[in-house]
Structure formats: structure tokens, C-alpha cells
Amino acid sequence: MDLVDAYLRAIAAHLPKADRDDIVAELRDTILDRLEAREAALGRPPTEAEIEAELHAVGHPLEVAARYRRGASQLIGPRLYPYYLFVLRVALSLQLAISAIVFIVALTRGEGDLGHALTAAIGSIINGAITLVGLATMAALIIEHYQVRLGFLDRWRVKDLQVLEILAFDPLPVLDWVMGRAVTASATDAGPREPWRDPRPRRRRRRGPVNPLLWIASGAVLTLWWVGALHFFPSGALRDDPELAIFGPFARLDWAAVKAAVFIPVLGYGLAQIGVGAAMLWRPAERRVYVAGRLAVCLVALWVILQAWLASPLTPAIGIADLQDMWSRIEQLWTPPPWRIPEAVIALWFPLAALGEIQRVLWFAWRLMSAAPVPMDARAAGR
Amino acid sequence: MPIDDDLYESLRMELRRGSLVLAVLARLREERYGYTLRQALAGDGLEMEESTLYPLLRRLETQGLLASEWREEDRRRKRFYRLSPEGEAMLARLLDEWRGISASLSAIIDKTS
């Protein structure tokens, strides 16, 4: 009965104190009834695995305990939810507008360059959005938990409702679209089939490949940063940062030389991403265009990895000469001194990443050559 | 159509939820403990998950509709539930409502089919 006791203890920890013993006693009785019924059916006492299976059927302890909890069982209830969404929509729109104004003012007054202003604007939008979502959720949680009555929600007049029409913008479809998973789950949607969407009707939405605009955006940010037009990561200051001392040999590296060694491949990688996005926009229905683009991105990524690993100033710090060397890198992961661990992790990452990239190259090359409309592989596409 | 199955399942659950309370209250005019109650309901054609039944019993008890006591049976202490007087009154009112809904639905279905 050790299993049952352990299971019940796990549940008890999450039950309200007042009824804990009572609920646990009843649950114990129920479980014992189940086990007796099982024993009668089997003609012998159930094995440990069979007991475990019975407990699984009862449910995860957290879930079982939650059924006995009083009060709200959701963060934001269905009554509050539309108001919550509306408040968020208004707050996020205002925040977006303010960030845009600040951005434009900074540009017109000539403070800093475009890169700085854009970086600051994107940063403030992301920070602000996270803060607003957090605050709104916390407020809703408190309202829900303490069952706060919001009287003003009941005292509305029709002539005050125009504000709702102005702010009717619903961000969720936009989010769906950006994430590339717009209504593909709906079997009734017989829209044009794009090659980066799995045309089979699906029971569950799964992670879809990203939208062409995200390819272009990520490629553009990488390219602009690489050529020095965006400054969100102080690459020049790397060497002077004392915290980087834990990276051992990396702290003494000449990062400018590293950048020079991989400059062309990384630039190519950014441009290839833009190219894939553009190709998806240009020929949305042409599977081969998309697959060829993905193949090109993978080839360039492989180039970046091999160049940095084998033929850059990084090579002496992270290179792996032979199997013996590889094994000593692996050993570094658990042998002191601990500050050599990051070095080993990075050294081991490169060959693994190269292998992964080779696998992707082969996959996309095969897809390009095979004529059959192979459905999109979610794992390969989710990069 | 897998999506329709999902939809059916969620609508069915919604439809059943209220009637299960009625079934439990009605079955507890006779005193029972959880396991035998579940068997009795299954015998009536109303399979009910333990995970639904036990929290429901507890909730109905805190609402004063059920009374319970721990008693020994088959060498084990079991919690027996029985309809309380308040529960009896509530059940009568709910059954009236249920018969009303059922009659209205039958009338609508007969008219439209």
C-alpha cells in the first residue's frame, strides 16, 4: 500500500486544510474499492504496475486536489474575460501609439541614429506589453479571487457605447496569422493551400511554420545588426566585461577578428532569411520555391557553423582535433574547474549543430527532388 | 470528422452536467456510499467518473443538500451519503423544472420533426 499512501500524501498536500483528512479518508476508501474490484477480476493481488495504472486512472494528484478546491478554478472567468481582453486591447494600443510618437520625436530631433531609436522603440513596446499584460492579469486575478463586484459594468448606457466600436480591433486573428496558424484547423476552410501549411485537416493545432513576414523581419534585424546599423548588443564591449571571465579563453579572444572571419557567411544567412520570406510572398503556392529557399538558408547556416568552428580565431579555443580530444571535452562537463564547462559546452555544440544542419540540408534536398507533395514537417519547419 | 466529435463531446458534457446532479440527488433517497452509488448510477445507464462524482457529493453536502456519516462496512470505514430534508425539497423543485423542460422540448421536437 506504499504506492497508495504516497499518492494520497501528494494529493493531501494540495487540499484545503479544514477538510484534508476527511477527503483523503474517502479517497483512500475509493481507491481500495477499486483495487479490490481489480483483484477480484484478476483472481490475484494486483502487481505494482497495475496499482500504478489504477492510480493513473484516478488522476494526477494536482488535478484531483483541484476538484475539491472551492472558489475559482480559473485565472480569469468567462464573465470577466471579455472585459479583460478589452482593457488589454486599449492599453496595448495606447502603449503602441506612445512608443511610435516617442520614436518619431527622437528621429525628428536628430537624437542618435535610426538604429538606436528603432531599438529603443522596440524595447519599450516589448517591455511595456509584458508589463501591461502582467498588471491586467494580476488585477483580473484579484477580482476573480475575491469575487469583487464591478458595479460600473452593470451601469452602462447605450449612448456611451460608441467607444467600443472605435476599439473593435481584435488582435488575436493577427497573432494567429503572424504565427502562421490561421484557421487551418477548421475543416470547413477551403482556402488556397499554401505550401508551408499542412493541408490535412488536423485534430489539434500544432506548431506551424512561421509567416513570411517573420522570416523577413528576423533576417532584416540580423543583417542590420551585423553591418552595424542596429546597436542592441554591445559587441565591441565584449572583451572588457569582467563577467565574461568565466568563459576562459573566450575573454581573451579578438572578437573583431572573429567577426571578420565569419562576416560574409553571417551576412549571407540574414539575406537568405529575407530571401525565403520574399520567396514565400512572391510564390505562395509554389512548394519548390519555399523548399529551395529553406535549403539555401540551411546551407548558409552550415557554412556559418563550419567557418566559425574550423577556420576562425575561435578555432583554437573550441576546436576538436580527434576523438580523444572530443572525449576530454565531454569529460570537462563534470570535472572541475567549473568555469571550463561553458567552453566545453560551446565546443561540443558546434559539431552537434553542424550535424543537425546537415540533416536539415539532406531533408530539404530530398524534399526538393521528390515530386510528391510531402506534407510539411513541423520540426524542420519550426526553426 | 474529428472536430465534430470534439464539439459533440463538449455539448454532450454540457447537456449531462445538470442532469447528473438530479440523478445523484434522486439516487440518494436511499443511503449509499460513493462506490455503490456509482454502480447504481451505472446500472441506470448513467456512467459517472469518480473524479466527477466525489467532488460533486462533497459540494452538495456543503450546500446542505446531502448529509453524510462515517460508518464501518466490510471491515472498512465508509462515508455514507443520504438526501437531507433540504435536499428532498430541492430535489422536488428541480424535478418540477426538469419535467417542464422535458415537456417543452418534446413539444418543440414533435412540432419541428
Image (tube, coloured by chain):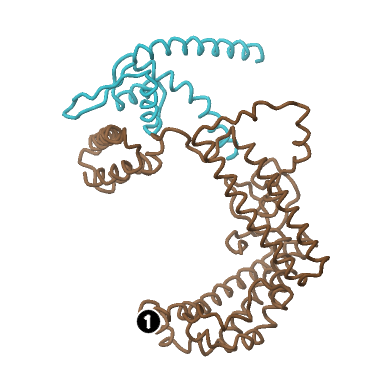
Chain colours: A brown, B cyan
Residue A221 placement (x, y as % from top left): 71, 69
Residue at image coords 62%, 15%:
B109
Q: Which residue is mark 1?
A: A337
Q: Is residue A11 found left or right of B13 in the rendered image?
A: left
Residue A162 placement (x, y as % from top left): 78, 33
Q: Is residue A137 found left or right of A115 in the rendered image?
A: left
Residue at image coords 38%, 13%:
B86
Q: Quadrant of residue A290?
A: bottom right
Which class describes the residues within 10 Å of circle 1: few (<14), some (14-19), or many (20+)?
few
Q: Nearer the viewer, residue A292 or A341?
A: A341
> Which quadrant: the C terminus of chain B?
top right
> Which quadrant: the N terminus of chain B?
top right
Residue at image coords 50%, 87%:
A317
Residue A304 placement (x, y as % from top left): 63, 80
Secondary element under disc 1, as helix, strand or loop, is loop
Q: Nearer the viewer, residue B106 or A10?
A: A10
Q: Farthest right residue? A: A108
Q: Up-down: is A165 above or below A280?
A: above
Label 1 chain ID = A
Q: Amino acid at mark 1?
A: Pro
Q: Up-down: is B85 above or below A181?
A: above
Q: Nearer the viewer, residue A309 or A115?
A: A115
